[in-house]
Image: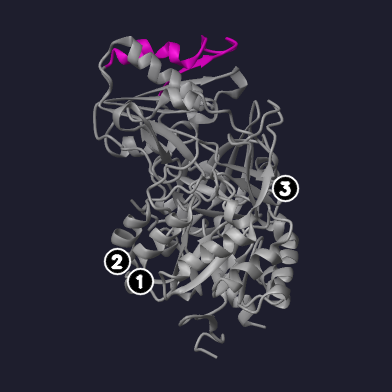
Amino acid sequence: MSENGFAGVDLGRGLTLPNPVGLASGTAGYGFELEQLIDINRIGALYTKGTTVGARDGNPPPRVAETGGGMLNSIGLQNPGVDTVAADYAPRWRGWTIPIIVNIAGGSVDDYVHCVTVLEPVAEVAGIELNISCPNIAQGLDFGRDPDAAGRLVAAVRQVTERCVIVKLSPNVTDIAAVARAVEDAGADAVSAVNTYIGRKIHRATGRSVLPLGTGGLSGPAIQPLALAAVAAVCDAVRIPVIGVGGIVDAASARDFLIVGASAVQVGTATFVNPETALQVLDGLRAD
Amino acid sequence: MTADLSRASLETGEVLVVERLGGGLLELVARLPHLAATAMPGTFAQLRCGDGTTPLLRRPFSVAWTQDDTCGFVFEAVGAGTRLLSELQPGDPLDTLGPLGHGFSVVDGGTVICVSGGLGCAPFPLLINELRRRGVDDILVLNGARTATRLYPAERFARPAVPVVAEATDDGTRGHHGPVTDLLGQALGSNPTALYACGPNPMLGAVMRTLTESGAELPPTLEASLEAPMGCGFGTCLGCALPVRGEHGSTAWRLCCTDGPVMPMREVDWEGLSTLPGADVA
C-alpha cells in the first residue's frame, strides 16, 4: 500500500500508477485546464488528448450532441501535433506527480512510430496509449477492427520505445477479445477498453443527423453496461493489465470494472459534468 | 493558449426564486456568493439541471446580474434541462461551475450601444452595471424580440436608473415593427466607442452585416457574445467550436467556452457561422 491508501497499479516497463483512477483521453486535454480546477496530482494518471503527427484543426461544428444518459462527440482529434506537445507542453508537466500518458493517434504505422519516437526522449512522459479506435477520423478505426493490423502496429511501436505501451481498444468490433489478444501477443504492456461507441442522433426538426459527419462517438453513463461487458471479455482473454473505461460516474460504477478484472479505470465524460468526479471516485474506492 | 480558470469554482447555491417574466422568459435568482463576487460581464456559469444522468451535461448561462451574494440568470424552458431549471423551488440547491469564459472588454468612456435579441438580453444588466461603475452613462440598449411579451423588461437592464431602451418586435406588438437591426442605423450616428451584441447567431450576423453595409466607421470596441452546443464549458472537450477568420481567408476554429463566449465581431467568420445548423434542443 502506498501512502494514499492504494497499492500501486503496475502496468509494466517501470510504469506504476499511484492509484487506479485516471482521467480518460479526450476528456482532460493535456491537463492544463483541470489543473486549475482540481488537485490533479491526486489522480492516478492523465491520458492526454489524442495526439497526431501534425496539428489538426478538428471537425466542423456542431461537434457534440447530448443523448439519453450520454453524449455524442465528433471532435476530430483537434490537437497541436506531437512536436508542440514534446517541446511546449511537456515542460509544463515538470513538477507534476501525476503520471502523464500521451495518447497517440494516426492513419498509418509510420504516423504512430513517428509520434512515439518524438516522445521517447521526453522525460515528462510516463507512458504511451495507442488510440487505434477513434471513430471520428478517416482510417481511425482500421487498426482497431483488424487484429492482425493492430498487432503489426503494436510490434512496430514496440521497436522504438522502452516505455509502457497501452492500447486503447475499440468497442465497435465483433470480437474485442481477439484484438486484445493480438496486441498482447505483439508486445503491448496493457490495454484500455473501451473507446466510444459509434452513434447517431437525428435533429428532430430537420430530420438530418445532428453531427455533420453523420455519426460520432457515444460516451457517458449510457454505455457503462456495454463497456463493462467488453472489459469483462477482454479480462478473460489476456494476462496483461486491463484498464476499464466507459460511463463511470461514481465509485460504484468504477468498482464494477474492478470486479470483472480491470486493474485500473479511467473517468471520462463525467469530468465534463463535474471536474471532481475522478477524485470522488478515488475517495469512494479508498473507503472500500 | 490555456484558458485562465483561476476564478472558476464549483459552488452549490440556494435558489431564491424562479420568476415568470411573461412570454416564456424566466429569471432564476440564486444565492451564489462565489459567483456573485467573481463574475465579470459576459462570463457564464454551467448549471446542473437536476441530479440524474439525463440530461447529462450542464447548461451554460450568462450571469445576467449580481447583487450582494446573489446572481440572476435569464432563460426559457425549451428543452429537458431548462424545464428542470424552470421547476426549481425556493430553497432548492443549484449546482454551478463558474465563472467561465472570456467576457466583454468594458470601455471607460464615450457612447455605448448594446444590441439584444430575445434571450440575448442575458449578459447586459451586469455589463451595464459595470459600465456605469466606470462612469459611462451614455448607454443605449436596442432590445428586439419576436413579440412584446418576450421583450426583457426595460427596467431590468439596469437598476435603479433605467438606461435608454429602444424596442423592436418582429410582429410590431411593441416598439419598432421589424428586426432590431433596423434601429442600428440611427444609433450609429452617435459615434459609439463600443457596440456589444448578444442574441441568436443569425441575428448577430445581421448586426455585423448592417454595420458593414452602413458605411459608418465601426466602433473601436465591437464584440458579440456567441453560442454553441457545449460539452464541458472549460476548454477540455473541444466541442464548442465556432468559425473565425483564419489566415489567407481560411476558416479557423475557436472555442466558444474559453476563447468566447464574447469575441471581437471583426474576427468571427459570419458567413461560416451562418451555414451551421441551428441548435438541437433536447
Dot 1: element: loop
Among the two numbered marks 3 and 1 on one chain, the one whose residue lies closer to the N terminus = 3
Tell me the magenta residue range. B164-190
Q: Name the spot of residue B281 as percent of width and height, x first.
A: 65, 35
Scheme of image coloration: one colour
Q: Are marks 3 and 1 in contact (CB under 8 Å)?
A: no
The reply to whether label 2 and label 1 mark residues of one chain is yes
Q: Are marks 2 and 1 in contact (CB under 8 Å)?
A: yes
Q: Name the spot of residue A167 as percent of width and height, x first.
A: 56, 66
* Frontmost residue, A116 versus B144: A116
Residue A68: which numbered mark, if any? 3
Residue in the image at 61% along x and 61% along y: A148
* Residue of label 2: A91
Among the two numbered marks 3 and 2 on one chain, the one whose residue lies closer to the N terminus = 3
Q: Amino acid at mark 1?
A: Glu
Indicate the quadrant where residue A193 lies. Answer: bottom right
Q: Amino acid at mark 3?
A: Gly
Residue in the image at 73% along x and 61% along y: A175
Task: Tell which subunit mark 2 falls on.
Answer: A
From what the image shows, is residue A20 above or below residue B100? below
